[in-house]
Amino acid sequence: KECPLLNMSKISYDTSNEGTTGGDNFAEGNLDVEMITSFGLNVNTIVSNTNASSTTEEGNGFGDALLNFLTDLAARDDVPHVLSMSLGSLSSASCNLLCNEVDDSECAAYLQTQRQVCMFTTTEQTAKINLALQVLGSRGVTVFAASGDGGSHFSFSAFDETGDDADLASALNEVSCANQLPVFPTGSPYLVAVGGEEWLDGDSSQPVAWQTSSYGGGAGFSRQFAAPAHQRTAVDYYVKTVSSLPPVDSFNVSGRAYPDVAAVAADGTSMSCPIVAGIVSLILDHRFNAGLGPLGLITPRLYAAYNDPAQTDYPFTSINSGSTNTSCDNGFVALPSAFDLVTGFGRPNWPNLLAMFSTDDHLPTNAAPSNRGTTTATA
């Protein structure tokens, strides 16, 4: 009813795991598919569900499952043009920091009882996942990842300070609020990290960063992966211009900064990520009809556009209000009309986005397009 042109025949699975109604991530998977197919009408959408147990849906088995999936995908003869990933957690580096500072022998075990908080086992594992994402980009896959729903401090929200583990939860909240804790895989430099926006009074002309007292679009700097060269100008300007940064020792200013962009996140960044993925899928359709190839990693081209003083028709529109503090007393804040550590470059501007990416006229020398492959979008 809401999307009468939706073509369900374009949706298929590439595994036998089609999910169970009411299952842990069944609604999450549905949301991905609904947004991609609604904003990328008639795009061939493949649902790849490798989750077969609770540990791969909310525990540290997820890291191995994601690594196996990405490695397999990168080795296929035919790869999708777009990959949208809405699930993630605090990075391994963030979880290590939490337990090192809390200094409680039960910390690691407790974190595994918390839904989708620490799902990666080691920094070596996340490094391998990062490499697989790099390979996908080199094969022409444009990868999108949700930036998380815990602002710059949490995976989702603060730890529950009631019950038998109240003291440990309280200590973890104190450490979390004292640090900006990045999530993964959105902290990889080989994808587009998507944050969240909402509309004041439901008015689309009044966008602000998506935030509540407990949740907010994820943002920050990776503690493991360095900032790519194409980010440095935008990030340096933000850091030098904003007067109310969090404590400088609470984040890694030389790390990969995120998010890059944002979209409507009424149901969290699990909603905004596939929205942008669907939109870019339509741009790819324009490119293929013009005889051009897929885009692969688009962030070098995106940042180059904003670094070009002659460029005025920006593909994303700045969101000028918001922060990442959620329930803490510090966080990153929005910077009007510029890249920031809240919503990146802002929300999609369809005419300018199409003009920028449907041709190769704005192609930086270090961002050559990949060879053309098959047309699919994967959730």
Image (spheres, rainbow, N blue to C red):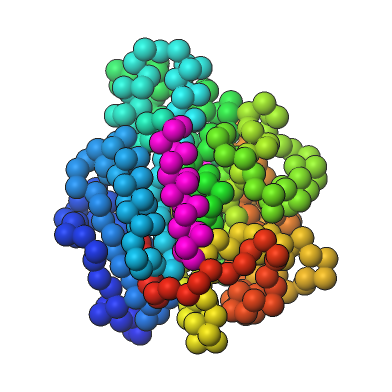
Does 243 sit left or right of 63 as displayed?
Answer: right
Q: Is residue 211 visible?
A: no
Using the rendered view, name the quadrant where residue 348 is placed: bottom right
Whole-percent x, y for residue 264 in the image: 50, 62
The quadrant of the picture occupied by the N terminus is: bottom left
Q: Residue furthest right?
A: 309
Q: Could you say which is closer to the camera, residue 357 or residue 215?
A: 357
Q: Provide residue 18's location: percent of width, then percent of height.
A: 19, 60
Is residue 20 at least partly visible in the picture? yes
Viewer-proximal residue, 142 or 58? Answer: 142
Q: Name which residue lies at 33% across and 71% down.
A: 45
Q: Is residue 317 magenta?
A: no
Q: Is residue 138 magenta?
A: yes
Q: Is residue 338 left or right of residue 326?
A: right
Q: Give me the residue at 53% from left, 52% from top.
A: 190
Query: Bounds of the magenta span?
Result: 123-151
Residue at left offset 68%, top offset 37%: 254
Residue 22 x/y as whole percent: 19, 53
Q: Is residue 22 left or right of residue 46?
A: left
Q: Is residue 220 above or below residue 368?
A: above
Residue at the spot x=43%, y=49% of the render? 132
Look at the picture and state if 128 lies above or below 179.
below
- How many circles with numbers are drawn on the protein? 0
Residue nearest the viewer, comparing 257 with 219: 257
Give how far across and how far down residue 272 sits, in percent: 47, 60
Quarter of the figure that contains the C terminus: bottom left
